[in-house]
Image (cartoon, grey):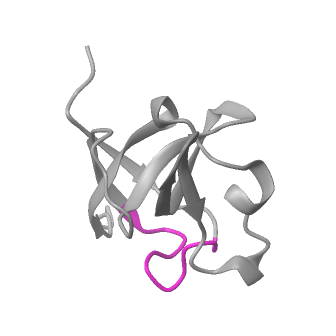
Amino acid sequence: MHWPFVRVKVAEHSMIPAVHPGDWLLVRRTRRIRPGQIVLARHPGQPSLLIVKRAARRVEDGWWLASDNPDAGAVDSRRFGAVPAALIEGRVLTRYWRPRSG
């Protein structure tokens, strides 16, 4: 059983200015997404690796995912092609910063 929501921490710079390294994202598990939404997906070549990208457009083989900051050396559909819909984990609902402990 999967919970309907998952949280992930952003590690890379590829989605600046929308999200930054260290941001936490609340993601709703769904494959119902629209172009322009930020999504959590599994990397097609490394399914254990989660990636955060913008759903640019729906294509025949799935979704074309793009980085907001391609100059950061981002890996997106320009490098690995369309991402099958089965590898889309969900869409980002909001970003937040974890409270500091101590």
- Give the image quarter of residue 48: top right
81, 99: nearer the viewer: 81
Query: Residue at point 32% right, 61% down?
Result: 101
On the image, the x and y values in percent for residue 33 come to 31, 52
Q: Is residue 75 located in the magenta-colored stretch of the structure?
A: no
Horizontal side of residue 25 vs 17, given as left or right: left
On the image, the x and y values in percent for residue 92 come to 32, 58
Horizontal side of residue 82 vs 36, given as left or right: right
Task: Please indicate, yes or no, whether residue 21 appears anywhere in the rendered image.
Answer: yes
- Give the image quarter of residue 3: top left
Query: Residue at point 32% right, 70% down?
Result: 97
Q: Main secondary structure of the magenta part?
A: loop
75, 82: nearer the viewer: 82
Range of residues picked out in magenta: 13-24
On the image, the x and y values in percent for residue 65 come to 56, 58
Query: Residue at point 27% right, 22% down?
Result: 2
44, 94: nearer the viewer: 44
On the image, the x and y values in percent for residue 32 come to 27, 44
